[in-house]
Amino acid sequence: MKYFKNFYKYRYLLYEIVRKNIKLQYRNSVLGIFWTFLQPLLTTLVLVMVFSNVFGSRNASVLNYPIYLLCGRLIYEFYTQSTKRAMRSIRNSASVIKKVYVPKYIYPLSNVISTFVTFLISLTVLACFIIYFYFFSDKQPHITPYIFLSPVPILILLVLCVGVGLILSTLEVFFKDVEYLYEVFCMLLFYMTPIFYSVDQLNITNKFFKMALMANPLYSITNMFRSCVLYGEMFKTSWLLYSLGFSLLTVIIGLWAFYKNQDKFILHI
């Protein structure tokens, strides 16, 4: 209850930091927040041109490859961007932390939330794709009432990003190398997540390698999201339970590590 009361006390500060982060993200940019729409659109078009002939046309299970790819790309980009910003948040706010008392968890949390806001805005690009292909293509996405369940994987992803962000922000204070190692990990994660391919399409014979791919929580979250917005069907319960359990466990570990070490931050930043 003490921590909840403290969070409620500083809720307006959290709001202002989130607002500031969103403004600074596109400061001095001619197009400004329009890049939130333009960036996923352009990168998706490039990826479609590169991978559609390899992974799109050969896979009958992929109902609509551009929408399939965009769903995975948006989820991956939100995860990587939010966790990277959360990881650097304590060091980037060192001057403020040394002068004024503010609950330190505000900094990684505000970076995750501000990235989440821009992610929600970028989902309008996905909405435009769905509308376009529904009316002007023979590869129509299946729009059913299950689309209203799409916030479920998004919220689970948000929880996962908060947990990972807390862990990384704690580690990065003490070990600067974490920042460089995580860049390599994110590159590996791009290929370990079915963004531009499907696991069934790869015909993996090694069951341990296939299990390793499915152990990635982004695998379950991405497939849940695609089930709702592209295939118009209920996602698997196993995906829900695994991703939710993994995310909650990550938050618990992140909170424990952060609160145990936050008093030492001042000695290392």
Image (tube, rainbow, N blue to C red):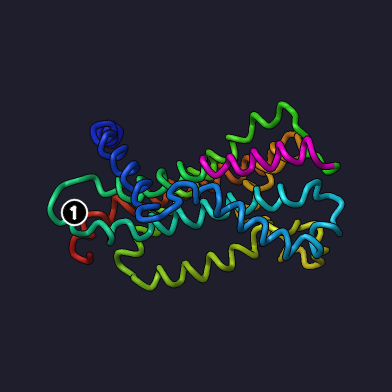
- Among the 4 quarters of the image, the one containing residue 6: top left
- Among the 4 quarters of the image, the one containing residue 216: bottom right
Residue 248 visible = no
Q: Is residue 48 left or right of residue 121?
A: right
Tell me what residue is drawn at x 54 percent, y 41 percent: 156
Q: Which amino acid does label 1 sit on?
A: Val
Tell me what residue is drawn at x 72 percent, y 58 percent: 48
**In terms of depth relative to the viewer, which is nearer, 60 or 26?**
26
Q: In this view, does 214 lie to the left or right of 11?
A: right
Give, as a single range, the part of the protein colored magenta. 121-137
Secondary structure that dominates the magenta span: helix
Residue 20 magenta-highlighted: no
- The residue identified by callout 1 is 96
Q: Which residue lies furthest to the left in this view?
A: 99
Horizontal and vertical percent position of residue 240:
63, 40
**In terms of depth relative to the viewer, which is nearer, 185 or 255?**
185
**In terms of depth relative to the viewer, which is nearer, 181 or 215?**
181
Horizontal and vertical percent position of residue 121:
51, 41
Question: In the picture, which quadrant includes the N terminus?
Answer: top left
